[in-house]
Image (cartoon, rainbow, N blue to C red):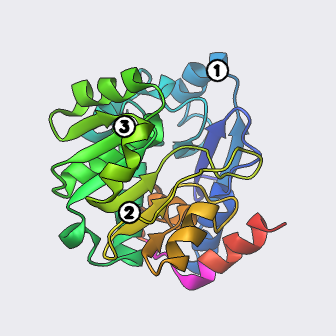
Amino acid sequence: MTQDIRAACVIGWPVKHSRSPLIHGHWIKQHGLAAAYRREELAPDDVAGFLSNLAARGYVGCNVTIPHKEAVLAASQPDDRAQAVGAANTLWLENDRLLSTNTDVEGFTANLDDAVPDWDGRAGEAIVLGAGGSARAVIYGLIERGVTRINVVNRSLDRAESLKERFGAAVQPANWTALPHLLARAGLLVNTTSLGMAGQPPLDIDLAPLPAHAAVADLVYVPLETPLLAAARARGLATADGLGMLLHQAVRGFTLWFGVRPDVTPELRALIEVDLRK
């Protein structure tokens, strides 16, 4: 590697599934940059050592995927978002400091802005299905955008209760049995679970109680159209899919590493769709 090339990478265990090299590689080529983006497969015990020598390895920053998103907090200086969510997915070097953030937050809201431009004006109450790391990022983003009641529905009520402790009164834990009643009041439904993903059990929800103005978002992007999104579209509801979030969450990292803010375009989306269908 020469000093003229700026490089970033994605770290994970495993990491071969990551579409980040395809996304960032597209933007590097589009903007004609002397830059590179690679995969680095790291076992959990190797993460701290790798990050402590990130610059020496020729990297200006990295993305983080499972299972390292929580562990990297201790090896970096997280911002308010990463601390609140309890996980980081984007790291960058600045004045010899390794900083970190969680761009899943803005990836989620930017995707909703793109797919359902007026979503925050009509959301009212929101429902978030699941209580894991993705749910934390979604909840943080919803609170940032002024949603004052977020019903977190999870099979384990204790995990939903822990999100109320983390984020405050905006979060209202609920059991799955409360869904029909909650759906009737909701302007936004978000699935953050793996239900409906290829190879996973289906997400079995009757969307009939949802108001006609409601929007439905699914963080799953394999398949591109989940059964939840198909059911929402059959009802004529506005939807936002998981692929859009994947693309939008990549924007800030690219900007931090390479000094150019890229656009999420139909061309990029089509490129990733082809790869997902392979």
Disc 3 designates what residue? 99
Q: Is residue 198 left or right of residue 220?
A: right
**Relative height, residue 71 to residue 85 (above, below):** above
Residue for point 46% across, 81% down: 236
Disc 2 designates what residue? 209
Are the residues tagged 3 and 2 within 8 Å (C-beta)?
no
Can residue 178 be seen here? The reply is yes
Q: Residue 160 lies in magenta, yes or no?
A: no
Disc 1 designates what residue? 44
Can residue 91 be seen here? The reply is no
- Viewer-proximal residue among 272 and 26: 272
The kind of residue tagged 3 is: Leu
Residue for point 70% across, 23% down: 43
Provide the residue span drawn in magenta: 262-268
The answer to which of marks 3 and 2 sits earlier in the sequence is 3
Secondary structure at badge 2 equals loop
Secondary structure at badge 3 equals strand
Quadrant of res 214: bottom left
| Distance from the alpha carbon under mark 3 to that under mark 2 | 44 Å
The answer to which of marks 1 and 2 sits earlier in the sequence is 1
Q: Residue 267 lies in magenta, yes or no?
A: yes
- Viewer-proximal residue among 3 and 228: 228
The kind of residue tagged 2 is: Pro
**Relative height, residue 15 to residue 74 (above, below):** below
